[in-house]
Amino acid sequence: MSNAPTQQVNRLDRRKARTRAALIRAAQSLIAEGRTSVPILEITQAADVGMGSFYNHFETKEQLFDAAVEAALDAYGQLLDRVTAGIEDPAEVFASSFRLTGRLHRREPELSRVLLSNALRLLSADNGLAPRARRDIAAAVDAGRFTVEDLDVAVTMTAGALIALGQLLHDQPSRDMEATTDRVTEDLLRMFGMTRRQAQRICSLPLPDLDAAGNSGPAA
């Protein structure tokens, strides 16, 4: 029996996936540029797909932009999971993720602008950074490394610090990114109950290599 129909379906699925990914990448670039009021035609032209293809995947422009933000946040969150998978201390996992994300504001400016343009999504998204921060903080509490009475407040403080740090690094391009990010991380760790010496030790540890984990920038 011929498997030609199955092959045709697989090719169609791959083509649909490529089209959706192209639309999401185009939307991410527009978000990073602060151009979310553009017409759908401009989005499809940037993605190099037909207007009809847009409506095969999304009902509205807003739906596409939501998907683009979620894709960027979740792709970066998955990258953090990979590079911290071998770290046993949950406090170090949290600190490494925050230190890496602080550096991302200069390393991946487009993704950084996506994050800053959608700050509230950091707190409410089901995927991405907020649930991972919650998971890591809770693990550090369970391990006796953090003292946190209200997990929601801890996540909110983490997101607020990340957003403010990113804006500061964009506003002051000559500021030392690494030193500033590590200082903010230390302050968070101390806020969560660690001593100054403990916080400084964790923030002086070598960071995982994002490139070795296959980082290729914002992913759709």
Image (cartoon, helix red, strand yellow):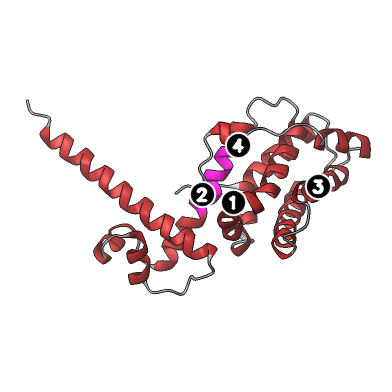
Q: Is mark 4 on a helix, strand or loop?
A: loop
**Label 1, on which residue?**
108
Residue 37 x, y percent position in the rendering: 46, 74
Q: What element carries label 1?
A: loop
Q: Earlier in the sequence, mark 3 or mark 2?
A: 3
Q: Which mark is residue 205?
A: none
Q: Which of marks 2 and 4 is nearer the N terminus?
A: 4
Q: Residue 179 carries which label?
A: 3
Q: Earlier in the sequence, mark 3 or mark 4?
A: 3
Magenta span includes 160:
no
Residue depicted at x 52% and y 35% = 214
**C-alpha gap between disc 2 and disc 4:** 13 Å
Q: What element carries label 3?
A: helix
Given contact means CB atoms under 8 Å apart, are the residues at marks 2 and 4 in contact?
Answer: no
Q: From which residue to which does the magenta span run?
A: 70-80
Residue depicted at x 83% and y 30% = 144
Which class describes the residues within 10 Å of circle 1: few (<14), some (14-19), or many (20+)?
some
**C-alpha gap between disc 2 and disc 1:** 8 Å
Q: Is 83 located above or below residue 108 in the figure?
A: above
**C-alpha gap between disc 1 and disc 3:** 18 Å
Residue 22 x, y percent position in the rendering: 36, 54
Q: Is mark 2 on a helix, strand or loop?
A: loop
Magenta span includes 78:
yes
**Label 2, on which residue?**
218
Given contact means CB atoms under 8 Å apart, are the residues at marks 1 and 3 in contact?
Answer: no
Q: What residue type is labelled 1?
A: Glu
**Label 4, on which residue?**
210
Residue 79 x, y percent position in the rendering: 57, 38
Q: What residue type is labelled 4?
A: Leu
Q: Which of marks 1 and 3 is nearer the N terminus?
A: 1
**C-alpha gap between disc 3 and disc 4:** 19 Å
Q: What residue type is labelled 2?
A: Pro
